[in-house]
Amino acid sequence: MRFKKIYVEITNICNLSCNFCPKTKRALKHMDKVSFLYILQAIKPYTEYIYFHLMGEPVLNPELKTFLELSAGEGFKVNLTTNGTLLKEVKDILISSKALRQINISLHSFEANESNLNFYEYLDSILCFVKEVNRQSNIICSLRLWNLDNKEQGASNELNQYILKKIEESFRLEDDLILKLQTQKQLKLCNRVYLNMAEKFEWGKMAREPSYTKRFCLGLRDQIGILVDGTVVPCCLDNDGNIPLGNIFEEPLETILKCKRAEDIYEGFSRREAVEDLCKRCGYGHF
């Protein structure tokens, strides 16, 4: 089995507390160098792409530079998702990385927080960072605004109009982004820089009543996740390890992926059926 990507949670610690984030009840920790290298070697037959994402802010891990170097040494391409507040501190590490393929910056994180950060300084620093990365490397940058309203719930998005106008000015765009985004949700701002917009979605929460029995998901098809303690989960939205398939530090990944629970999940989605309680409560799958 090959996956398009494997999520590796190099830390579940975050410096923000976004209102859209379900948080985690797990013990907070950073992954260490030995554990990370073990994971790289264990997943090498299964993918070329790893994502530093699940819970937590990945640039907080003090071993970030080492992890990127190890990833390059093992032939992996890395995507990193960040709230963008700490990019200035790790800019040189990211730009010089041979493994880093893409940086996803969640601009919607700022408005979803009660923070002492200055929004205008935050946005300016991110736009300056993206342009510098673009000048000095081949890294792709994706600016995300995943905070559009949907039928079920509102989202924190009052700053979107200002953000879009600021992006227009910064990249000297002739197009009206607000108008253009009415018909398409992903735009190319310049070479290797994109703007991506989406509706706010509901993370699966065990406390919520199940409401999505008939669905399809790419978990265990094009992705799996590995939590900071080594627990393997079917997808990147299992923030608390509610569907543990096994632990990569305790048994081979091949054995974990062939366990009955994993097979039941895979076969269930083949029938467009969610068999796990968490999946029945997640708003991200497809009908």
Image: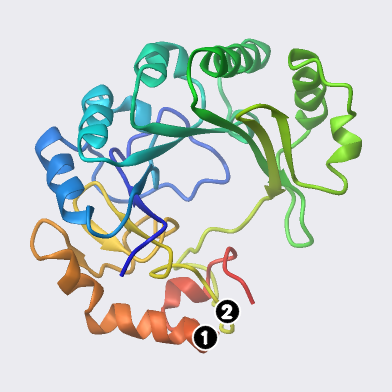
**Rendered-image quadrant of the C terminus:** bottom right
Q: Residue at x 15, y 49 (%)?
A: 41
Relative depth, front residue between 33 and 77: 77
Q: Residue at x 38, y 69 (%)?
A: 220
Q: Residue at x 41, y 79 (%)?
A: 276
Picture quadrant of residue 174: top right
Q: Which mark is residue 235?
A: none
Which mark sits nearer the N-terminus, 1 or 2? 2
Q: Position of residue 84 (x, y in %)?
A: 51, 24
Give the structural element (helix, strand or loop) at label 2.
Answer: loop
Give the structural element (helix, strand or loop) at label 1.
Answer: loop
Mark 1 near mark 2, Cβ–Cβ under 8 Å?
A: yes
Check the image and report above or below for 97 versus 236.
above
Check the image and report above or below for 255 versus 7.
below
Q: Position of residue 29 (x, y in %)?
A: 22, 38
At label 2, counting other C-alpha atoms closer than 10 Å, the crowd grade (few under 14, some 14-19, many 20 or more) is many
Check disc 2 and report the residue beneath it.
215
Q: Position of residue 230 (x, y in %)?
A: 19, 53
Q: Residue at x 71, y 39 (%)?
A: 156
Residue type at mark 2 is Arg
Check disc 1 and report the residue beneath it.
273
